[in-house]
Image: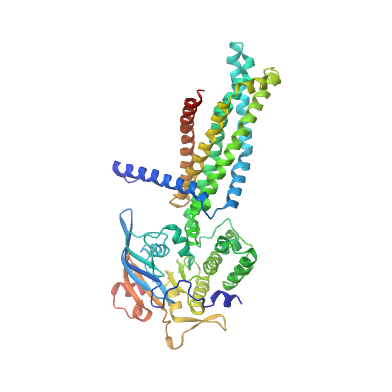
Amino acid sequence: MANEILTSTSSPQTGLDEQTAVVDFQGVSIAFDQKTVLDDISFTVARGETRIILGPAGGGKSVLMKLANGLLRPSSGTIRIFGEEINHMPERDLFKLRAKIGMVFQESALFDSLSVEDNVAYRLHEEHVSEAEAHERVVEALKFVELEQAIQKFPSELSGGMRRRVSIARAIISKPDLILYDSPTGGLDPITSTTIVELVMKQRDVSHTTSLMITHRLQDAFTLAMNRFDPETGKMRPIPDGGVDESTKFLVLNEGKIVFDGTTLELVQTQDPWLRDYLS
Amino acid sequence: MPFVSPEDFAKQKVAAVQDYSTLSWQAVTAIFSRPRYWADIYTQMDSIGVGSMPIIVLTGFFTGCVLALQSATSLKAFGAISMTGNLVALSMVKELGPVLTGLMVSGRNAAGMASEIGSMRVTEQIDAMRALGTDPVRKLVTPRLYATIFMLFFLTIVADAVGIAGGALVSVALLGLNASSYFHASYRALEYADVVQGLTKPLFSAFIIATVGCYFGMNTKGGTQGVGRSTTQAVVISSVFIIIVDFIVSRAMIGIFGR
C-alpha cells in the first residue's frame, strides 16, 4: 500500500514535455569571496534520469546541488529547472517551484525541535493538509523507509542512518518530480549506506523520479548503477549479465570543473589519467 | 587573522547595515500577507513574555527598592523625604522601567533568538526550511518581532508597577513614610507625557531586540563557535542600541511634550 501510493508514477505536475530537460545548467559559475567554486558548468538531466555526482571533497558538489534548488544564485550562467529559468526568479516563486523538488541534506537537516512525524509532515502542514490525511501520508512515507516505529521520536533519539531515512521520507512525501540527494550515505557505516542506496534505487526504479545524487563512495555509485530494485522481493538485485541501468549516469567534478559527463560504461572505459586514478 | 583593508572593512559594514535593514523590512511587512504563522507568534509570546516575567518582576521590584533607599538620603537633606514616591514613580515610568526591561529581555531573548536561529543555520535547517517551501523570515523572524513588541510593552508596565511597589515597601518599612501619601505622591507626579514616553520606548527596544537577535542568528557562520559569537554580538549590540535609542526617544519626547 505504502509503496503503491508513494512510488506510483505520478503524472508530471510540471507540464513539461518529455524532451525538456528537468535540470539544465549552461555555463554556470559561482564564486565566494572572489574564490571560484564552480567554473563554467554545463550539463542536463533528462526526465527519469538518475545523475550520480562524484568528485573529491571541496569540489563544489554540494554548491551545485544548492544551485539546482535555488538556495544559491550563480555568479554567471543559466540554470533551468523544469524548463523555468531560476537565476533571477523571485524567492516567492522559488518556494512554489520547490514544492516539486525534494531534497535530502548532507547532515539530514531535520528540525530538532519537531518529532519525526512533524518533520515528515512539515510540507503537508504548510499546505494545510488535514491532520488525518497528513498522518496517513506520514505513516506511508515512513513505511517506505521502514521506519514507521520511530514516528513519535525526536531527531536526537535517532541514529545517523535513521535520520537520513527520515530525511528521505520528508523529501518524498509530496511525490516530487525531482529529488536532490546531497551525500545521503556520507558518514554512515557500509551496511546502513547500502540500506540508503536501496531506498534511492527503490525510488528510481518504481517511481522513475528524476534525481541527482552526490556520493563520495564509489561503491554506492556503482551499486546504484549495476543493480535494480525488485518490487516482489523488496530487495535490490544485480542486473543480469553485468548490465547497467540505462537511466543512471555520472557527472564527475574536480576543483569546480566537470571532468566527466556520461554513462556508466563510458566512465569505466575512460582513458583520462586523473579519472582512472580517482576510480582506482 | 587576515588583514582587511579599510575599503573592504567599510564595504562589509555597509553591506551588514543593508542586510539588517532588508531583514527588518521583510520581517515587518510579512505580517501583511499570507501565510501568517499565528501559532508561532503565540508560542513566542509565551516564551518571551511569560518566560521573562520572573526576571522582570525581580529586576523591577529591587530597582524600585534601591531607588527609594538611595534617593531618601538626598531628599532628607532638603526635608523633602515625602517626595520619595514622586521620584520613584517618575524614574521608573520614564526611564528605569523601559530601559531595564529592555536590557533584561535583550540579555535573555536576543541571546536566545541568535543561538536558536544560529544553530538552525549551521545545521542547514534554515536551508531545509527554504527547500521545503517556507520563507524563514516569515516563519522565524516575523513571529519573534511582533511577539517581542507586544509583550515588551506589557512587561514594561509590570516592571513599572512592581518598581513603584518596591519603592513603597522600602518607604513604609524602612523610611517610615505613610503608604497612602507615597502612592498619592506617585500618582500626582505622573503626567500623560511621562506615561507616553515610558510606553513608547519599549516599542523601539523590542524592535531592536528581535531584529538584532534574528539578524545575527540568520547570519551565523562557523559551527558552534559561530553560534557563540553570534549570541554574544546580539546581546552586546542590542543592549548598546537600546541605550542609544532610549536617549534619542527621550530627547524627541521632551521636544514634543516639553517634559
Where's residue A88, x and y in %? 37, 59
The quadrant holding residue A157 is: bottom right
Percent position of residue B79, x then y: 61, 11
Relative to A11, is B35 above or below? Answer: above
Color scheme of the displayed model: rainbow
> In the current view of this chain or complex, which residue is farthest to the bottom?
A241
What residue sits 61% from the left and 42% below the top?
B49
Count of marks overlaid on the render: 0
| B153 displayed left or right of A52 | right
Residue B210 pos. (x, y %): 51, 43
> Is A28 on the left or on the right of A66, as rendered?
left
Residue A158, percent from left and from top: 58, 63
| Residue beneath the point at 61% across and 48% down | B42
**Residue B5 makes an appearance in the image:** no
The C terminus of chain A appears in which quarter of the rendering?
bottom left
* Nearest the eye: B4 or B41: B41
Q: Is residue A100 above or below residue B83?
A: below
| Residue A243 visible in the picture | yes
On screen, residue A235 above or below B35: below
Q: Quadrant of the N terminus of chain A?
A: bottom right
Of residue A11 and residue B79, the one placed in the foreground of this image is A11
Relative placement, left or right, of B153 versus A29 is right
* Nearer-the-camera pick, B244 or A263: B244
